[in-house]
Amino acid sequence: MSVMDKEFQKFPKAVESLLILQSSQWNPDNPMKWKSSNVMKSQVVKANRKVRDGDFTVSAALVKQALPCQEQIKSFIAHLKTEGQNWTLPIRDVVMTTKGLLSIKLHRPGIFQKVLTEVFSQGDRYGESQEDGTSGVVVINNAALMSHPDAKSSDEVGLDKLRCVLFCDQLKNILRKLGFTVHEVCKHQSPGFRNALKNFQIQPPSLSIDQERRTHIASKLIKKAACSKFRATKKQTHKEMPPNSSNMEVGISQNADPSRENTEQVFKAMKTQTDDDKMSENSSNGEVQRSDKHELLCGDCVSLDLKQYLTDCGIEQGKGNFDRNIDIAKVTDGDGDGTSVLQQCICLEETCQSLGAETNTKVIHVVPKTKEFHQQLVDLTWRIVSDTDGSSQLHAICGPVLTRASSGGSEKDMTVEEFYSIREAQTREASVMKYGDEVQGDHWNEVIKHLTIAGIKFELLGMQLNNQVKLDVSDSKQNSSWPDSRDGVFVMYNYARLATLFSNYDQEVTNGTYPPLPSLTSIDFATLREDQEWGLLFNYVLQYPIILQDVYQEVMSNLGPKVNLQMHKICGFLVSLSRDLSSYYSHVHILGGGHSHLLPVMFARLYLMKAIQQVIRNGLSLLNIRPLEQM
C-alpha cells in the first residue's frame, strides 16, 4: 500500500484521538463516558463520496456527546485546524454544518501533487505490495474442476464452472499483487474444457501425468486414514446417511470411479510389500498400531469419523462453521475404488508436497454452492491424512449462474460456448449501431472479441461471490435490460476514450499546437477547482489500493472455514469510476485552443486523466482483461 493510502486510513483515527484528548480536558471527571456509547460502534469519522460536503465528517452524535457546548466545539475546531495543517493529508478548513456535523476539508493542491507522484512512480504496480512473496503462500483449489479423468462426464462446460474459473484467475492475480506466492491445485482438463476457455485466455494447471508419484501419494494417504484413531468402524460406515445427503456428500462416487484402476494399483502395491513392514505410530500422533497392511486393507472400506475429529479438536459446527450434518466420510470402499474425497486429497497433497517446506501456507477452496458440504469433507479428511498442516483452509462459496431467455421466462442450462456466442452477437450488433458500416474486418473482430470477454467477466465477477447471478440472454432488440449488463464494455470504452485523448494531444504537440507536457513537479494543481476533479482523485485514484488491501486483510485474518472475499468490488469500483469520468468528460474540455493562459489547467487535467487511465489499466489487469487503445 502506498504512503498516501496509509495516511488516508490513519486520518480518521488521528481526528478521533484528538477529539478524545480535547474531550478529556474539558470533562476530566468522566472523559471516556461517551467512548463506550452506541455512537462508537460504527466509524465516527468517515470519508465523504460527495466531496462538496467536505472530505471527511465527524458524526453529529459524537460531536454532541464529546463536546456538549459551543465553546468546546469552537476550541476543538481551532485546535484541529492548527494540528492538521502539518499532517500528510493537510487540513484546509473545518466547519460545523447545519445538521451538527463537523465537515473537514483537505488542502487539495498538495494532495493532488503527492498522490499523482506515487501513481506515476509506481505505474503498473500502483496498488500492489512493493515486496513480492513476503505476505505468505496461498494454494488455490478450484473444487469445480475434476480431480481425475472422468470418462462419463460431458465435455460441455457450464456457466457455474466458468464463474469459478474466472474467480480463481482474479483471485490469483490479486493475491500476487498483494505480495503472496500463489500456486494452483492441478486438476484434470478435458479437451472440451480447454476449448471452452480458449477465448478467455485462461489455462488452469493440468493434472500431473506422473502416475508413479500419484500412486505413492495415494498409498500414503490411505495408510494414514486406515491407521488413524478417527477411522470409523464398519457399523458406523454402513449406518444410514443423514437426511438430504447424497452419496457425493459422504464422499461416495455416484458412478464407478474411472480412477479405480489407479487406486487398485495402490492396493496392489501395498499388498505386495513384505509383512515385516509395520504401521506403528504412537497414539500421540493420532494413530493406532496396525501390524499387517494386507490384512487391514484387503477388501476393507476405509472411512473416517469426522464428527469425532471435530469434537476432539474443539472445532465448531453450525452457521458460519462446519455443517452440523458432517459425520462419516469414505476414503475407499471394499471394491478398491477411491472416492472423490480421496482424489481431491491426492491433488492437494501433490501440490503442497511440490512446494517443499513452505511456511505460512493457506489453502483457499473455491467451491460451487452445490459442493459446499462435500468440500468440507475433503477439508477435514485432508487434515487427518496429510503430513502438512491443513488447518489453514478457507472456503469461498460460489453461487450458481442462472440464465433465462426472457423476462419471466423459465431458467435454462447453457454452455460457455452458447453464452459466449449470444453475447458476441449482441456486442457486434451494438457496435454496428454505434459505428455503422466500419464495423468489419480483422480489427473489429478482435475489438468485439475483447469487448465480449470484458462484458462476460464483469457480469460473472461483478456480483458478490456467494450470491447467484441471473443472466438475461434475450434478443437485445426486444429486451431493454441487456444493455445494463454491459458494464465491462462501458469501462473498456472509457479507457479507449482516454487513450484517444492522449493520442490527439501527442498529435497536436507534433503539429505545434501545444507544448509537450511539462514535469509533474511544475504543475499548478490549484487550477483544478471542480469538485468532480477532486472527487475523481479522492474517491478513486487515492482509494484504489485500499480495495486490494481489504482482500489481504480478509485472507490473513479469517479463521475459516468460510471466507467472504469482496473481490466483486473491483468491478463495481471500475464501473463507478467510469461513470464519474464519463460525466466529467462530457462537460469539461480538456484540450483547449492552445492559448497560454489555458495551458496550466490543461496540463493539470491531463495529469489527472493519466492517473485515472493508469488506475483503470491496473484494475482491468486484475481481471486479466487487456484494455483497448481505440474502439
Image: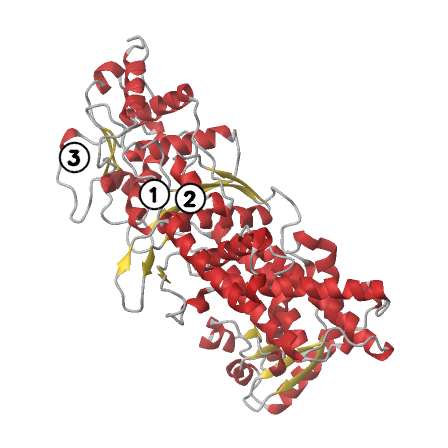
| Residue type highlighted by circle 1 | Glu
| Residue type highlighted by circle 2 | Ala
Asked whether residue 434 appears in the rendered view, the answer is yes
Q: Marks 2 and 3, how far apart in space?
A: 43 Å
- Coordinates of residue 264 in the picture (x, y in percent): 27, 20
Task: Tell me whether circle 2 and circle 3 mark residues in contact (CB < 8 Å).
Answer: no
Front residue of 232/533: it is 533
- What residue does disc 1 label? 156
Residue plotted at (55% across, 48% down): 173
Q: Residue furthest front?
A: 437
Task: Tell me whether circle 1 and circle 2 mark residues in contact (CB < 8 Å).
Answer: yes
Element marked by disc 3: helix
The disc placed on residue 196 is 2
Asked whether residue 516 appears in the rendered view, the answer is no
Q: In this view, does 385 lie above or below 565?
A: above
Residue 53, image quadrant? bottom right
Q: Is residue 256 above or below residue 605?
A: above
The disc placed on residue 367 is none
Front residue of 138/62: it is 138
- Quick one: label 2 or label 3, which is nearer the N terminus? 2
Element marked by disc 1: loop
| Residue type highlighted by circle 3 | Gln
Q: Is residue 504 above or below residue 156?
A: below
The disc placed on residue 236 is 3
